[in-house]
Image: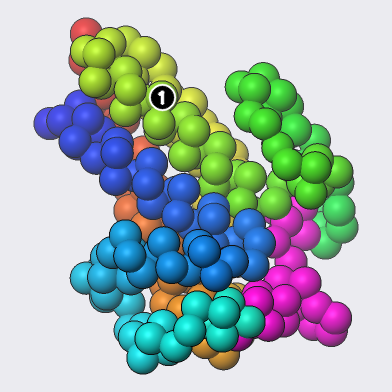
Amino acid sequence: MALTLFKEGAKSRCDTYGFLAGIFRQELTAQQIKEMINSGVLDMLTELGAKIDRNFFNKPAEQVEEALAIEYTALFIGPGKHINPHESIYVPDSTGKVGYYWGECTADMKKWVEHYGLKMSEKFESIPDHISIELEFMQRVIEQEHLSWQRNDEETAKRCIEVEKTFFNKHIIKWVPLFLNRVIDSASLDFYRETAKIGKDFISDEGNLLNEETAGVTDTN
């Protein structure tokens, strides 16, 4: 049963991590907004329970782009009080210090990125524990898992799952739910608020999958 859950869910999990990484990476462009509408992403979010005002997205894409950019800046960049999108701001180091850049978790994240060859844009090279990098890391590993299932390479798929579990428990679960809660509480536009709600539910499901179902995966030979 456990292997089937991972095999059947890999593509969807990969796509969801990729979507969330894109939402929190930077302001959405008009082209990205058009693609999101035309590809059915808004429909998917609605089906998942998101309460998004579709009339907002019926406006010209350039107007939507401007409104979402203003919201993104207010939420994650500032000036003024904003939600910091870096893990080290939330997770204390071994001495108990928290709330500063380049903590121990940042250095550890850098090692993960370098070991698995994840290419970062120059924007994130200086501080690699940005939420979009961590979500993209999960996306990339699950993508490899999905490709392994497609070529019937069960052993490689299982190794990918082990990486997913370790990284999720070492990084994602320690701060992403808190980050998403702050987005839910602070967002003015329902797009970011509802996307954060969907993301929070997804991360909860991921925790259950990776920590309750992996025994069945690793025990299968």
- Front residue of this view, candidates 140 and 103: 140
Q: Which residue is mark 1?
A: 144
Q: Is residue 188 left or right of residue 149?
A: right
Q: Which part of the image, by quadrant, shows the N terminus?
A: top left
Residue found farthest to the left: 1
Find residue 56 and report its image quarter: bottom left
Q: Is residue 70 left or right of residue 172?
A: right
Find residue 117 and report its image quarter: top right
- Front residue of this view, candidates 193 and 55: 55
* Colour mode of the rendering: rainbow
Q: Report if residue 28 lies within the magenta region.
A: no
Find residue 176 and report its image quarter: bottom right
Count of marks placed on residues: 1
Q: Which residue appears at 27% of the width and 75% of the height?
A: 46
User: What stretch of residues is rendered in magenta?
Assistant: 67-91
Q: Which residue appears at 79% of the width and 49% of the height?
A: 123
Q: Position of residue 36 (x, y in %)?
A: 40, 64
